[in-house]
Image (cartoon, coloured by chain):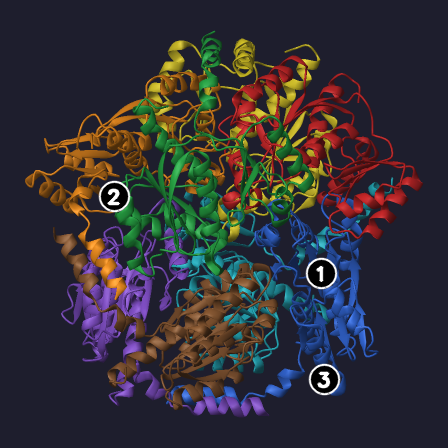
Chain colours: A brown, B cyan, C blue, D yellow, E red, F orange, G green, H purple
Amino acid sequence: MRRADELKNLANLDFERFERAGKPEAVFAEGKSVEDLVKIVKRFIEEGKSTLVTRLSREQIEALKSFEEVKINERGRIAIVGKPVSAKAGKVAILTAGTSDIPVAEEAAVTAEFLGLEVLRFYDVGVAGLHRIVEPVKRIREENVDSAIVVAGMEGALPSVIAGLVDVPVIAVPTSVGYGVNLGGITTLFAMLQSCSSGVAVVNIDNGFGAAVFAALISRVKRKAAGED
Amino acid sequence: MRRADELKNLANLDFERFERAGKPEAVFAEGKSVEDLVKIVKRFIEEGKSTLVTRLSREQIEALKSFEEVKINERGRIAIVGKPVSAKAGKVAILTAGTSDIPVAEEAAVTAEFLGLEVLRFYDVGVAGLHRIVEPVKRIREENVDSAIVVAGMEGALPSVIAGLVDVPVIAVPTSVGYGVNLGGITTLFAMLQSCSSGVAVVNIDNGFGAAVFAALISRVKRKAAGED
Amino acid sequence: MRRADELKNLANLDFERFERAGKPEAVFAEGKSVEDLVKIVKRFIEEGKSTLVTRLSREQIEALKSFEEVKINERGRIAIVGKPVSAKAGKVAILTAGTSDIPVAEEAAVTAEFLGLEVLRFYDVGVAGLHRIVEPVKRIREENVDSAIVVAGMEGALPSVIAGLVDVPVIAVPTSVGYGVNLGGITTLFAMLQSCSSGVAVVNIDNGFGAAVFAALISRVKRKAAGED
Amino acid sequence: MRRADELKNLANLDFERFERAGKPEAVFAEGKSVEDLVKIVKRFIEEGKSTLVTRLSREQIEALKSFEEVKINERGRIAIVGKPVSAKAGKVAILTAGTSDIPVAEEAAVTAEFLGLEVLRFYDVGVAGLHRIVEPVKRIREENVDSAIVVAGMEGALPSVIAGLVDVPVIAVPTSVGYGVNLGGITTLFAMLQSCSSGVAVVNIDNGFGAAVFAALISRVKRKAAGED
Amino acid sequence: MRRADELKNLANLDFERFERAGKPEAVFAEGKSVEDLVKIVKRFIEEGKSTLVTRLSREQIEALKSFEEVKINERGRIAIVGKPVSAKAGKVAILTAGTSDIPVAEEAAVTAEFLGLEVLRFYDVGVAGLHRIVEPVKRIREENVDSAIVVAGMEGALPSVIAGLVDVPVIAVPTSVGYGVNLGGITTLFAMLQSCSSGVAVVNIDNGFGAAVFAALISRVKRKAAGED
Amino acid sequence: MRRADELKNLANLDFERFERAGKPEAVFAEGKSVEDLVKIVKRFIEEGKSTLVTRLSREQIEALKSFEEVKINERGRIAIVGKPVSAKAGKVAILTAGTSDIPVAEEAAVTAEFLGLEVLRFYDVGVAGLHRIVEPVKRIREENVDSAIVVAGMEGALPSVIAGLVDVPVIAVPTSVGYGVNLGGITTLFAMLQSCSSGVAVVNIDNGFGAAVFAALISRVKRKAAGED
Amino acid sequence: MRRADELKNLANLDFERFERAGKPEAVFAEGKSVEDLVKIVKRFIEEGKSTLVTRLSREQIEALKSFEEVKINERGRIAIVGKPVSAKAGKVAILTAGTSDIPVAEEAAVTAEFLGLEVLRFYDVGVAGLHRIVEPVKRIREENVDSAIVVAGMEGALPSVIAGLVDVPVIAVPTSVGYGVNLGGITTLFAMLQSCSSGVAVVNIDNGFGAAVFAALISRVKRKAAGED
Amino acid sequence: MRRADELKNLANLDFERFERAGKPEAVFAEGKSVEDLVKIVKRFIEEGKSTLVTRLSREQIEALKSFEEVKINERGRIAIVGKPVSAKAGKVAILTAGTSDIPVAEEAAVTAEFLGLEVLRFYDVGVAGLHRIVEPVKRIREENVDSAIVVAGMEGALPSVIAGLVDVPVIAVPTSVGYGVNLGGITTLFAMLQSCSSGVAVVNIDNGFGAAVFAALISRVKRKAAGED
């Protein structure tokens, strides 16, 4: 009965330690009614637990404004309920190719801050004007950044260019910004996966939240090594 | 009977003048048997007419080597039968992102030369190492180039970057170089059409021939203005 | 440190000369709030700078009507803020296959005029009634046109037919006009890229703006040759 | 038990009359072994029945050459076993856009002749050179043709143009001729379905056989009216 | 100057005869403003000309109700302006697989009647209950129908089944009825093109109008043979 | 530590009972070298264990012929190593639309027999000739069949038609038989999922093995109820 | 006249017995007007017949609330008109991966109960937290469940995991829950069809109704064996 | 001249430091002739430089066997020329779902070892048998692994399951293993991007090399923090 024994071993693993680690509780607001969302948020507040609420609609944002425990970032359509998880978790640079990519970048930024990361924002630095990437590349190199989140729509070329100039992992986030052959971001996604620079990995279209969680896990590697986690 | 009259006008247009202009006769070799191809080439030679033969297979190339009127470019899988059309038609820069894109670039180069264009080649200057684009950009700016053909596979970012740095029309040629989500070049094509730089137009995947014909038509605009054509 | 030196060379290129050239500043209105758009337009007016505003919604158009410095083309959903860039830049023919393609054609026409091109409009001349193409073909041949922008939806056959009859570069613009297998214009785009006539290059679906910028760059080739630019 | 009664009615329909009508027995050779194919053909010969064999490979063609009852059209990769069905069934015009479309057209032509149709062939009359369509259009109008089969690859524009000039039903056959965005003929198929001319219906990619059967059914309508069928 | 001569011949063809034949003038209402549509319809009425108006919205239908010269079919979202073209042109059967396919079938039926065809309607006879097809098959066989238009969504199996039981051409119309993998009707379209019965040709998704025009052209073949057209 | 407890419960489940049940060990031969495959088969023989080997190539079949413990079905490209699992497990009908679907059907049939099912084969009973389905429908109704596996390529209509006439679960298997818009079986798959008859579920393209395993699990439900399993 | 005889046999089959069996009458509400829907429901009530109404909109639900014979499940957007078909038909487990999948699961659950199945619900037990699947797996094994319906969106991994742990047929229902590359559920559907566990069959996206009908047919196999049906 | 100044700053960045960092030189062998590949490899050997050669064909592998400086991993189709870059860079776990995924995993493993990472291999631990994941999860938790590379084809569920059980970044590699709806790995890729577990990022299909480079960059974060890099 080898299989059963192995499953027992799995059962004996310390799940609690894992639960302290890295991945935040989060509420995906899209598709939820305002009433349901308010109910969920209230429960978190009553239990004194923290959480992120992502993909808020205009209407949901208005409904959450009355809670003083809720801090809303309207551009990123994201809210923090309660207190951020920790401080001093590491440092991440967040870049966008255009201004339309900023909402996704802000979702990433708020998530990263919630997870204790310091965030360096460099927005609207796309490849059509190469001079704009000088500053972010310099800062990434000089300021001990652990990883870079690069948010881009359209032809999605920015992650390739950045990964060719820095030596940290680049997490690429395709956005659904574009028209015609954009296909809701799939063209951008595929272009990023085709990157001729190595050192790039990709998350789902518009998934700023997932990119930031991944960045926080990278920074944790460092902290674990330093015995801080 | 208004329609008939209009069609008569069309019929009266001078087709001969048009036939002298811009677009070369060409033979698409792919899918033709060696015997059929040899027969076609012989007819051109006998009639003293020039033509291009594109998309040659290894076997077809061997068969054409015996003709002294045929000049073969093996890398570009293209041959010139007879004499090039003219000299001094203008100047075009041809760039590739990687080395695998060179066959398509050579198809373009030979076609352009056949049509009388001077060709500046800049190969393997992709965006993963930005320092490589300095030289071609400088030369395009300083040497009175009429247009640039930019050949790229993978994420297809090079045309965007080049178009952001030069002031001539950029003709982008997606190649089927890549794997996984490349989809035989469609990802590259779509990324190029999504270019956030304006001043880029695109031809079919691997269509170096078409890009060069288009470049020659651009250069003709100049020559017509100068009364040379 | 070869790479660094090469990048220094790039840095020394004269960007100012480039900025005078060919490519207009433009604001993509789609997805912007009316308030944000008005703010942006006001800044251009205050700084005395010219720009194009593309993809205007009905509501945005109403908001811009109060500005006397703004000239709106409602059909093309495009506005000029300030004065056009220059006069006498060249000549372009703009053709559409059907009446539904006219908004995209007007976006191209206004952009071209903004960039100093003279525009010849030939609308609703699709291939289902061939007698309709006589007039535009004749005019393109006789009036020293530098390039032709051909706007079509549905099966996208017009660029092929026109390119077979004229000797200037044909810039094809697929539109999202159609239903069923149209796939938002992708069928039209692919059909155009498959054109059996050479001398055709393609821009993104519905991208009248991009086609006109490309046409202006073609006309600049002529003017540079004539020492006018 | 209404349903059962209705099915009995269906059962009482005269199937034999139907079996005499319009649709030929046919063997699809693709994927069959040479031995299996020879066995099948022999059985038809022994039973004195006629049939068509379509999509023959080079190897299969060689194997069938020894049978004197089999008449092979190598270009169309199709063979007739036994005698054609009838004579004087009607008249069909078959057009191709390019030379590469001819094998599919020949499959249609042989099938049509097998079904008793007179065939008018007009090959290589694509839209890149409009003057080439004059002759076929004139003949279709003057010679009492019942329908036109238009075979095209690439951008598939020929059926639209022809349907705009003739008053018989146009059966469009997309071919898998093309490269890049051709997608094995799907682009051509979709472009044909998008035709801005009415009077066009479409069959599967490369399906010359199906187009000819459909044409024969159209001609039968006429013969039935004349009491000939 | 062979080409010019040939085009002259084309110009000399009798276009007027063609214009009397088969293909109706039609207005595609989708995307047109109510005001524009009313203006167009008024012009037809004033000039005493007949036309079809297809793809009417609820709002457009209300606006057209005030005209007594306009006869509206609300289910088919189609209107006849003026008098039908002719009587006694032939006979067509129109079948649908489900009740949701009826609007497209009615578009076909009204168009067919406008073109002088007698229409036999058989609705909701899909393959999930085979006993339902007995009646239409019997009537098609017995009543001298020239062609059958088969309208179906979902798996699109009805045209195959019908074509296996009747001896007239089957014009298949895929509809966008379905969900999940329906892909807006493309699955249905592809299934119909894959039909294992010969004698089926297909028009664009939801294109009832095109199917009816095609059916009218088939019936004209008969009338021409009888010297009636 | 609720989670750990729950996982312990999972671990305590009786895996052995499960291993006796329903799902056979199987070797997917595609892509394996002949040597590797022979090694794997030998191990099964030595250990006296039974297994299925699916998707055999011509070459692999030849190599396995020397083993007397291996029983090969060449048409289904499948082999049984050792003895079938059991007898008297239930009854399944297997139908195909065409003859080209038979290899996939045979893969299902051999798998079903290996799992102890009695198999009723009805091949080449597609919807183009409805009279062919009478026999299989009658037998399914009269002979206490537990489920029906319906294998079809092309338009995939057979499962819909069968499910409309029988009262057992229909397991549809799309095959990659077809051309043009078949898309390697995806069109067939989608058409089957769109079935307007309820009572149909689908497995992956060409997955005869999976369909038979599913059928065996259905028959086990009966045997469990009867206390036989 | 063999064919006719065979069809007569089909006609003689006992349709009435079939009509008592397995497959419920159902009304697909999507796209129907409130008035039409109310009319249909009234007719069922007047005739004393039972039916299911699926895919109800918010507005349609309000309209049906006034009927006391109608029992509405708002979450599943489904209503029962009249009395369920029978009791004691069998037992099915219904699992969902997330909370967003519950509406589809409820459509399945209500349909199953209408068909006389006992339903075990296990919601929100997705693979991101494996400890959650312990309870449902245990219950499925211990409680004599006939089949399991597994409803999942996103990566659709739950059916594979469950099928690896239980010995009953798993009916997988992909949902359109997800974003970015979800493609309206097609990614989930394809992932499920690729399942590396055997014993899984799939229905259309969001088709809870179809899954439950299939489950009821499986349970009928058992009852037929026991002579109960 | 702000732009030029900024570009000068870019030029002054220390590229040499970057070149020491993280990303290895690599040769993509696919599509290269044996002669060209041997030439390239010889140059590396002569210059005493190290490199990886990926995607070797059977023939290329044979040709490289004669070089003693080349160490070939045949299963991973990858070779190391010269000495690995460094030792003690960190630790990575590499898991595969099936045995067919091992070649891609070995490409990753060899690359990781070349970059100085210690590799823990856990192959064939897919979700169809959950007990198999106990060991790898335990080892990842206990042995201070920096990241996990999870290689899977088919439904691609393994990364989701693993990411739900460990607290390190999971780099998912979709493989082209599968058939039917696998679409060359795109289904697997999309399923992975849809992962309901956070903490997963994805690279291109079959891109084991890219995953390993990314893992090495993650480990470098730790070493930089520890002042080792």
Query: Which residue does the numbered mark 3 point to in the structure image?
Result: C43
Splitting the image into 4 quarters, where does residue A210 fall? Answer: bottom left
Q: What element carries label 2?
A: helix
Q: Position of residue E108 (x, y in %)?
A: 70, 32
Q: Position of residue D129 (x, y in %)?
A: 66, 46
| Residue F173 visible somewhere in the drawing | no
Horizontal side of F182 relative to F91 (left or right) equals right
Chain under disc 1: C
| Mark with earlier residue (1, 3) | 3
Question: Cβ–Cβ below 8 Å for labels 1 and 3?
Answer: no
Q: What's the residue type where badge 3 is placed?
A: Arg
Residue C5 is left or right of residue E155, and the answer is left
Residue ranking furthest to the left: F46
Residue C185 position in % (x across, y down): 62, 53
Q: Report the residue marked by disc 1.
A: C104
Return the residue at label 2.
Answer: G142
Label placed on residue E54: none
- Secondary structure at numbered mark 1: helix
Image vertical order of residue F153 relative to residue B92, above or below? above
